[in-house]
């Protein structure tokens, strides 16, 4: 099935046009700076020349028009007719407590997405704009929503509740939701494939480390805990986000610095984490270079980042009652030799023994544990767009089968 995968942000749309039969993208690209007169569309078709278009793209609907135009273009396109797009799969950040899997987007689903805006005010409105734009330009084509949260929907209450008055959970749905679900699920399934064992029999910890980062503890195919919480701010130290924090710091700093809620939110989300501690960069490559050059604060940031991951790995081994594999993925997890080394060093007592030489030779997927290691240490490139495409295909096929029964 040929599926258009859309990841709509507030001022950008990333897209891939995927043929699920070959599990490959026929074209990928993005529209950035939506809403401005100098919006940019970059389009990379497979086996054809890449293009970049700069122009006025004032909203998501016009952005989708442009995307369809390049997909259909005689020189840079990959289809001859719009009808070759058999379905659209949308990344939706927050499904709240309403979705434990991917769904066909109906009017009722749209209503629920709108209700969940409060839980993800930065992301869900943009996702909804993307869905509406796609519905407008591809009116008779099924649209499927794939949620970042749904893989974690089966967490037990002791993992998702916070130690605050229960009424707040009832009233405002304040609980752990977790994110990056498509990536955690994808690499956990790949890990089972690499180990040649049934997914439903394995204890796996997945570490998705990109600009944002989270860990998930997956027991017999079910995410039983994850480090991001009510929002993506909790857990690991990230590029610009603070991760776990003593909540008292928030009110204390607001008082001392005279910050309002919006400013404090910006401080924790945009000016903390690696950039906040190092004062240098939120980008791990640049940070590693700074560490090599002897920059002390860059070293503090790097150590804080890897120590936090190590602590989570230890606690998740306890939560899982054992471990078959630790998986690294995301830009940092897949590429940073130094991060994997620092996280896995001196973890033999927990069954993790990293082979330092193999760790330096990663190119794609690889098991970097020693032969004696009780648990495997796997590096697996993630592919969230492919998961969205495959889920979309599955939901559309289920609908078709339902109709013909
Ligand atoms: P996003 O979360 O935006 O999808 P990515 O998964 O692409 O981000 O991860 C981006 C991060 O990966 C950046 O911090 C970048 O520095 C880091 N990264 C990419 N390549 C390397 C590398 N070779 N070594 C260390 N870090 C890397």
Image: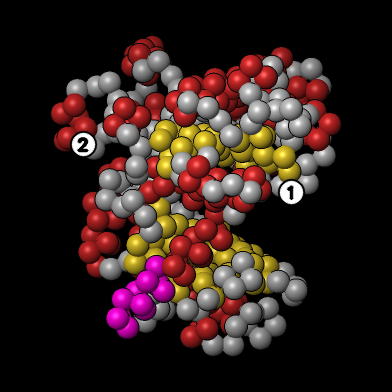
Frontmost residue, 90 versus 248: 90
Chief secondary structure of the magenta span? helix
Above or below, 104 against 188 in this view is: below
Above or below, 114 against 276 in this view is: below
The residue located at (78%, 46%) in the rendering is: 363
The residue carrying mark 1 is: 364
In the rendered image, residue 219, in percent from the top left (x then y), is placed at: 46, 37
Q: Is residue 357 left or right of residue 219?
A: right
Q: Is residue 62 left or right of residue 55?
A: left
Above or below, 178 against 247 in this view is: below
Q: Earlier in the sequence, mark 1 or mark 2?
A: 2
Frontmost residue, 328 versus 294: 328
The residue located at (37%, 71%) in the rendering is: 398
Q: Is residue 4 left or right of residue 377?
A: left
> For residue 121, which numbered disc appears in the image?
none
Q: Is residue 214 magenta?
A: no
Circle 1 Cα neighbour tier, 10 Å, few/some/many (<14 / 14–19 / ≥20): few
The residue carrying mark 2 is: 172
Label 2 SS: helix
Label 1 SS: loop
Task: Tell me where the magenta segment starts and ends, as one range.
Answer: 395-405
Whether residue 99 is visible, yes or no, is yes
Q: Is residue 400 magenta?
A: yes
In the rendered image, residue 76, in percent from the top left (x then y), is placed at: 68, 78
């Amino acid at each position: 099935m040929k599926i258009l995968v859309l990841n709509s942000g507030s001022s950008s749309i990333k897209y891939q046009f995927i043929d699920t039969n070959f599990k490959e993208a026929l074209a990928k690209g993005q529209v950035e700076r939506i809403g401005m007169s100098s919006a940019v569309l970059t389009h990379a078709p497979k086996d054809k020349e890449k293009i970049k278009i700069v122009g006025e793209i004032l909203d998501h609907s016009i952005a989708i028009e442009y995307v369809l135009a390049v997909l259909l273009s005689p020189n840079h396109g990959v289809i001859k007719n719009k009808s070759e797009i058999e379905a659209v799969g949308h990344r939706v950040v927050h499904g709240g407590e309403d979705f434990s899997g991917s769904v066909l987007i109906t009017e009722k689903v749209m209503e629920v997405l709108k209700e969940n805006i409060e839980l993800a005010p930065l992301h869900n409105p943009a996702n909804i704009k993307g869905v509406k734009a796609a519905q407008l330009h591809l009116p008779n084509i099924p649209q499927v929503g794939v949620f970042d949260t749904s893989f974690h929907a089966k967490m037990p209450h002791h993992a998702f509740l916070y130690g605050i008055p229960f009424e707040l959970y009832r009233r405002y749905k304040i609980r752990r939701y977790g994110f990056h679900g498509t990536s955690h699920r994808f690499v956990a399934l790949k890990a089972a494939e690499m180990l040649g064992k049934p997914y439903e029999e394995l204890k796996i910890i997945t570490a998705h480390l990109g600009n944002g980062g989270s860990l998930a503890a997956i027991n017999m195919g079910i995410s039983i805990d994850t480090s991001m919480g009510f929002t993506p701010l909790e857990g690991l130290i990230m590029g610009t986000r603070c991760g776990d924090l003593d909540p008292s710091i928030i009110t204390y700093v607001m008082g001392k610095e005279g910050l309002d809620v919006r400013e404090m939110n910006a401080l924790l989300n945009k000016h903390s984490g690696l950039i906040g501690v190092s004062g240098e960069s939120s980008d791990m490559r640049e940070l590693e270079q700074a560490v090599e050059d002897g920059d002390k604060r860059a070293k503090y940031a790097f150590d804080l980042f890897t120590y936090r991951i190590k602590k989570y790995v230890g606690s998740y081994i306890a939560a899982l009652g054992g471990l078959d594999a630790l998986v690294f993925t995301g830009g940092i997890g897949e590429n940073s030799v130094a991060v994997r080394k620092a996280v896995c060093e001196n973890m033999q007592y927990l069954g993790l023994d990293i082979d330092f030489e193999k760790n330096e030779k990663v190119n794609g997927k690889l098991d970097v544990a020693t032969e004696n290691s009780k648990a495997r240490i796997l590096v697996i490139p993630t592919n969230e767009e492919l998961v969205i495409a495959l889920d979309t295909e599955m939901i559309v096929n289920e609908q078709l089968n339902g109709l013909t029964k």
